[in-house]
Structure formats: C-alpha cells, structure tokens
Image (tube, rainbow, N blue to C red):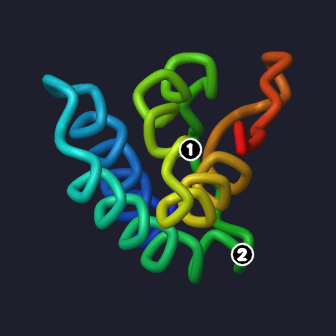
Amino acid sequence: MRSPLADGLQAVYDGVINVLGRNNPESELKYRLLESAVDIIGRHSRDGTCLKLARSIEVFSLLSNLLDMKKYQKVVRQFLVEFMDCKRTNLVVYSRN
C-alpha cells in the first residue's frame, strides 16, 4: 500500500508531465515548473519514495529547446536525470554549447 505522501508526489509529478505536454508552454513557464518540481518532489523522493516515471523519450522533446538556453540547462538536466526513466532509452543529456 502506498502512503498518502507517495500518492501526492505522484500527482505533482503527473501534473508536471501533463502541463509540459500541453500546447508547448513558453520557456520561462517550463523552467519555473521544472524548478518547483525538482524542489518539491526532490526533497521527498530521496527519502525512498518511488514514483512511476515517464519515459524520457516522451518528455525530452518537450524540453530540448530549454537545453539550448544556458540559464535553463542546470534545472532541465537535473529534472531529466532525477525524474525521467532513462534506463529504457539511449537518451544522453548534453549541451549543444
């Protein structure tokens, strides 16, 4: 049985993925959303809370434009590394700079 905390964190994560998939929100909104997700979910996921992660191949294209902008790269990489299932793909997170 999952804890209420785990269910709440999963809802936050699923909401982030859902918003990213909507009509390509502007870069600053994506950045703030990812930054908040890393802060909120990251604090608790390190405590052993397991999330059902989205496949990185499905989300990477929604974030690739942010990787081209230096001010967003750190947060985007952190989100991709911590909250994407990279094991099922050959995804490599890199900078084009």
Q: Position of residue 77 (x, y in %)?
A: 66, 53
Mark seen at residue 13: none
Q: Residue at x 49, y 51 (%)?
A: 69
Q: Residue at x 32, y 48 (%)?
A: 16
Who is closer to the viewer here, 93 or 9? 93
Q: How many marks?
A: 2
Which quarter of the image is occupied by the C terminus? Answer: top right
Question: Which SS class for mark 1?
Answer: helix
**Side (left or right) of 65 relative to 45:** left
* Vertical order, 4 against 89 (above or below): below
**Side (left or right) of 24 relative to 30:** left
Which quarter of the image is occupied by the N terminus? Answer: bottom right
* Mark 2 or mark 1: whose residue is earlier in sequence: 2
**Side (left or right) of 25 relative to 97:** left
Q: Position of residue 58 (x, y in %)?
A: 51, 18
Q: Which residue is mark 1?
A: 67
- Disc 1 marks a residue whose amino acid type is Leu
Who is closer to the viewer here, 71 or 8? 71
Q: Which residue is mark 2?
A: 46
